[in-house]
Amino acid sequence: MYWEPEKECMDREELKQLQLEQLQATLSRVYMHVPFYRKKFDELGIDPDEFRSLDDLRRLPFTTKSDLQDNYPYGLFAVPLREVVRIHASSGISTVVGYTKNDIKTWSNLVARVLTAGGVTKDDVVQIAYSYSLLTGGFGLHYGAERIGASVIPISSGNTARQIKIMLDFKTTALVCTPSYAMLIADTIQKRGININALSLKYGLFGAEPWSEKMRQEIQEKLGIVATDNYGLSEVMGPGIACECLEQVGLHINDDHFLVEIIKPETLEPVRMGETGELVITTLTKEAFPVIRFRTRDLTRLNPEPCPCGRETMRMARVMGRTDDMLIIKGVNVFPSQIEAVLLDIEGPEPHYQIVVDRKGALDDLTVLVEAAESEFFDEIKKQHERIETIKKRLSSELGLSVNVKLVEKKSLERTEGKRVIDKRKI
Amino acid sequence: MLRIRNLESGYGNLKVLRRISIHVSPGEIVTIIGANGAGKTTLLKTIAGLLKAQAGEVLFEKRDITRENPEQIVLHGCSLVPEGRQIFAPMTVRENLLLGAYVQYRRKHKNEVDVDLAHIFQLFPRLKERESQLAGTLSGGEQQMLAMGRALMARPKLIMMDEPSMGLAPLIVKDIFAIIQKLRDEGNTVLLVEQNAQAALAIADRGYVLETGRILLEENAEDLLSNRDVQRAYLGRDLDAEIKI
C-alpha cells in the first residue's frame, strides 16, 4: 500500500533529476533569503549558481544544532513570519522551526506515507499518544492521519490507564507513540490481566527514539500487532522523514523531499555505501525552514537496494545510536548499541555488561565484561568457554575488530546506564 | 520526455539563464512563471535551438539535442509556438497550417496531413470558418489559434508555448487555455511559459518559478497557487493591504 505511488516508486534516474532541480532551487532561495547561509557561502567562496550536480553537495558547509541555537528564534527562517502558519520547537526550546501553509501540506502528505506504509488506512481508528505540544510528534502524526481520512483520537501522551480504557472502548486499531511508551502500555495491559483479544489493535507506528529488534518482537507479541519504526527530527521537519513498510527491512527515506548522506563524524568525509556513520540531511522542498546538510548526530547506514514492497527509495537502518556515544577503537567506529544488540540476541533481554577500552602498548584494546546468568554453574568450564567464544565471534564480525570477552560473577557489574562504557585510554 | 540540466544561455556576453534544471514528463502541462525579463523566452528559444546553449544539456526523449539546429529539433517532435504568434500575414490560414506540416513531408507521412488538418479545424472551428482568409486579417485570438494549429501540424510530442495569452482579451484567454487543456487530455505534453500565472497554474500540473535566470521553486501547480511569494509577485495580490490589524 502506497500513499503517493508515483513518488514512492519513482524511477531512480527521474528522482535524481528532481533532486537536482529542487536542490538548486533551495540553494538559490536560502542564498537569497537567509543571511546565515549567504554569509557562510560567501566566506567559503561558494556560488550557488555553480552548483551543477548532486555530488557538489559535499562542497557545502554543514549546519549544526548550534547554528540553529545561535540563530534563535527566527534567524534561519527563509520566509517572513507572516507567511509562517505553525511554529514548533525542540525539547529545551533552544531551536525553533516554522512551517508555511505549503509546508504543513507537504508534512501531512509525508506522514500519510508513513502511516500508509505501516498499514493504516482510512478505516482505522488511530490513537495518537505523542504529546500535542511544541514538539513535532503529536501534531505531525495527527495531520497525517487526518490526511488519510482515518478516525483520529488525539489523546496525547501520559495517563496509561486512560490510554488503555480508550483503546478498549473506542476500538483503537492503530497505536502511535514512542516504542518505550508502547512497551509500558503493553506491560500494563499484561499486569492487569486484560486479554489482548479484547483489543482491536492491528498496527503500531513507533518513533522518536531508538529501539531494538528484540523490543519490537516483544511489543508485537504482547499487543498482537505489527509494529513499524519511523524516523524524523524537528530541526528537519518532524516525523515523516523515513519509515518502515510492513516488510520491516529498513526505513524508506522520503528522498523526493530529503537528500541524505552518511559521513564519518570524525573526518566529516562521506562513508562508503552501506557503512555506518552520521546521518546528514538536506531539505529539498521546505519553504519556511530549509536546512542544508544538517548533522543529525544519529548513526545509521544506507541501503540503495529496492525493497520487496515495491518502493524504490533509499533505505536507512534503524538508528543505532548517537555520535556522542561513539568510540573509536583502532580507527574503527564502535557504538555501544551495536555491542548491546549482539548481547541481546545471544543473552536474551537485559544483559548485564560493561565495555572496557584500554591501551596495550600503542594499541587499543576492547574488552566486554558479561555477567554470568543465574542458572550458570561457574564450574562448567567447557560451557563457559563455548559461550565466550560465541559472543567473541559475533562481536568481532559485527564490529570488524577483535574483541576480548570475559565472564564475570553475577551482580558484580554496576547497574547504572552511565557505567556501561569505561574508557581508560589516555591520549 | 524533456530533461534539462544546468542549462546556461543568453545573448553574447549577457548571461540570462543560470544553470537551469527542469524536466517535463509525458502527458504533463508544466508551466514556467516569472516576471518580464526573468528568462522565460530565452529558455524556450534555447530548447528549440534558436539560441545556442552556453553550457548544460537538453535531453529530449533521452537524445541530446543541445547542439542540434531548430529543424532537427522539430523533426524529433519538439515544437515551439513563439511569442507574438509569428504567423505569415500575407498567406491564407490554410497555407499557414500546411507550412507547419513540412516536417511531415520530410518524415514521408504526407498522407497524414489531411487528417491532421481536419483535426485542427475540429479543434479550432474558427480557423475552419476562415480557412481561405489571409492570416493578417485575423483577430489576435484567432492568430494565436493559428500559431498553435501550425505547431500541431508537425505532430509534436512536446508543444512549447510562449505567452499564448499575450495581448488577448480575458474571454479569449479562457478559450485558449481550455484548448491547451484539451490538448493535454488528448495525450499531448505541454511546456507553457506565461506571465499570466493565475491562468497558467489553473491548468498546469506542475510549475517552476523563474527569477532573474534562476529557478527558485518547483512545486505542484496547486501548491504554487497557495505560495505567498508567488501570490505577491505573480498573482497580483497585495497581501499587505489584506492584513488589517
Image (cartoon, rainbow, N blue to C red):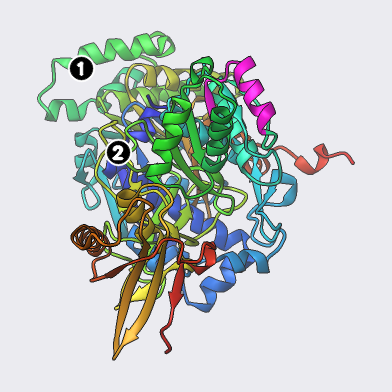
Q: Which residue is mark 1?
A: B113
The residue type indicated by label 2 comes to: Glu
Q: Residues within 10 Å of mark 2 (few under 14, many from 20)?
A: many
Q: Quadrant of residue A108?
A: top right
Residue type beneath disc 1 = Val
**A170 within the magenta span:** yes
Location of residue B244 in the rendering, given as x and y in whole percent from the top left corner = 87, 39
Q: How many marks?
A: 2
- Chain letter behind tag 1: B
Q: For the stretch drawn in magenta, what is the main secondary structure?
A: helix
Residue at the spot 32% in from the left edge and 36% down from the top edge: A10
Above or below, A48 relative to A316: below
In the image, taking residue B132 as reference, residue A196 lies left or right, namely right
Is there a contact, CB below 8 Å, between mark 2 and mark 1?
Answer: no
In the rendering, at what x and y percent does residue A351 appear?
40, 54
C-alpha separation, residue under disc 2 versus residue under disc 1: 43 Å
Report the span colored magenta: A160-175
Is A244 rendered above or below residue B187? below
Residue A411 visible from this viewpoint: yes
Element assignment for label 2: loop
The residue sitting at the left extreme is: B108
Depth order, front residue of B81/A276: A276
- Structural crowding at the residue carrying mark 1, measured as other residues with C-alpha within 10 Å and reported as few (<14), some (14–19) or many (≥20): many
The mark closer to the camera, 2 or 1, is: 2
Please give the residue where the numbered disc 2 appears in the rendered image: A312
**Residue in the picture at 67% in, 29% down:** A161
Q: Decide if residue B176 is in sight here.
A: no
Residue B194 or residue B208, whichever sits in front: B208
